[in-house]
Image (spheres, rainbow, N blue to C red):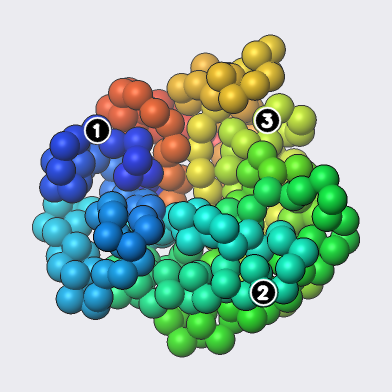
């Protein structure tokens, strides 16, 4: 397994400064976030030359860009919206993101599916998301880039069984799960998610969480919370996972890197 870090967690006033900081802290990869048109290091309106130029800068810093977050793509276009037209806009945004991920050299696009509203039925949202992901498959195949749905605090996919059923319902090797260790700690056990999802996991986010706090303020430095990382690592190795562990921890990225070394040495 290799160590990654989310771009938004890395300090620096410029893209190159952040890339240098990530590499100096010992990471092998950096996960960029798509911005709305005209913003961020990787914008939705960026052309192939701009994206490939960014890829060259990443490689010059001795890093990889194995995955890309696409949360911004779903602003106003949630894949859980009951309106098929809204979901279709989300699919179109993600298809654009997949092309740019391919130019960047990434093989996975993270999907935040959106928030489940109180007036939307769970089954309705589930079926709509399955349809949206199936609609994305041609774009995934054209780009040779997969998509991975993350378990997030959105009142949806709250168990590994739900996530596994979603991936299986789509039934395509380029559609999987982006498992976030810290996001499930409040109400479940992370290792159970890994054992249940197994090879459906395309990528892993690492962070930690303190249950006694119980709110967003409970997210904390690796190994300072209630995530059972020895069990998580044993489960990941048993599942044959050999991809990136990407830190989504804010603060001292060098300290996080050192703690990630300890986690990688487990099991």
> Which label belongs to residue 152?
none
Residue at image x 58%, y 54%?
112
Dot placed on the residue nearer the N-terminal end, 1 or 2: 1
Q: Residue 14 at x, y = what percent?
A: 15, 43
| Quadrant showing the C terminus | top right
Q: Secondary structure at mark 2?
A: helix
Q: Which residue is mark 1?
A: 11
Residues packed near mark 3 inside 10 Å, few (<14), some (14 to 19) or many (20 plus): many
Query: Closer to the camera, 203 or 267?
Result: 203
Which residue occupies the foreground of this view, 15 or 245? 15
Cα distance between the residues tagged 1 and 2: 38 Å
Q: Residue at x 35, y 36 (%)?
A: 9
Residue 226: quarter of image: top right
> Nearer the N terminus, badge 3 or badge 1?
1
Residue beneath disc 3: 185
Q: Are marks 1 and 2 in contact (CB under 8 Å)?
A: no
Residue 227 placement, left or right of 164: left
Residue 225, horizontal then vertical, whole percent: 58, 19
Verify CB contact (< 8 Å) between mark 3 and mark 1. Answer: no
Judging by the rendered image, the residue that carries numbered circle 2 is 85
Q: Residue furthest top?
A: 212
- In this rendered view, identify the residue nearer to me: 132 or 120: 120
Q: Is residue 29 above or below residue 46?
A: above
* Residue 113 picture location, percent across and down: 63, 57
Q: Going 24% across and 40% down the picture, which residue do you hit? A: 22
- Disc 3, SS: loop
Which of the marked residues, 3 or 2, is nearer the chain's N terminus? 2
């Amino acid at each position: 397994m290799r160590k990654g870090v989310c771009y938004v967690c890395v300090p620096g006033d410029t893209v190159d400064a952040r890339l240098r900081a990530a590499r100096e802290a010992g990471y092998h990869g950096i996960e960029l976030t798509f911005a709305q048109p005209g913003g961020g290091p990787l914008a939705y309106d960026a052309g192939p030359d701009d994206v490939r130029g960014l890829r060259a800068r990443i490689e010059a810093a001795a890093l990889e860009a194995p995955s890309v977050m696409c949360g911004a793509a779903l602003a106003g276009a949630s894949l859980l919206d009951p309106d098929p037209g809204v979901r279709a806009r989300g699919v179109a945004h993600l298809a654009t993101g997949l092309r740019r991920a391919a130019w960047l050299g990434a093989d996975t696009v993270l999907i935040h599916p959106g928030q489940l509203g109180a007036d939307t039925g769970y089954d309705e949202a589930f079926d709509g998301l399955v349809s949206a992901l199936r609609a994305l498959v041609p774009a995934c195949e054209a780009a040779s880039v997969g998509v991975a749905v993350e378990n997030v605090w959105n009142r949806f996919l709250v168990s590994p069984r739900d996530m596994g059923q979603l991936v299986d319902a789509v039934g395509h090797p380029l559609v999987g799960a982006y498992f976030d260790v810290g996001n499930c700690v409040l109400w479940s056990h992370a290792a159970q998610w890994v054992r249940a999802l197994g090879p459906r996991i395309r990528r892993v986010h690492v962070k930690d969480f303190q249950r006694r706090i119980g709110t967003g303020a409970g997210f904390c430095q690796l190994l300072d919370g209630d995530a059972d990382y020895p069990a998580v690592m044993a489960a990941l190795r048993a599942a044959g996972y050999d991809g990136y562990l990407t830190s989504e921890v804010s603060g001292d990225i060098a300290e996080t890197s050192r703690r990630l070394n300890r986690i990688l040495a487990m099991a």
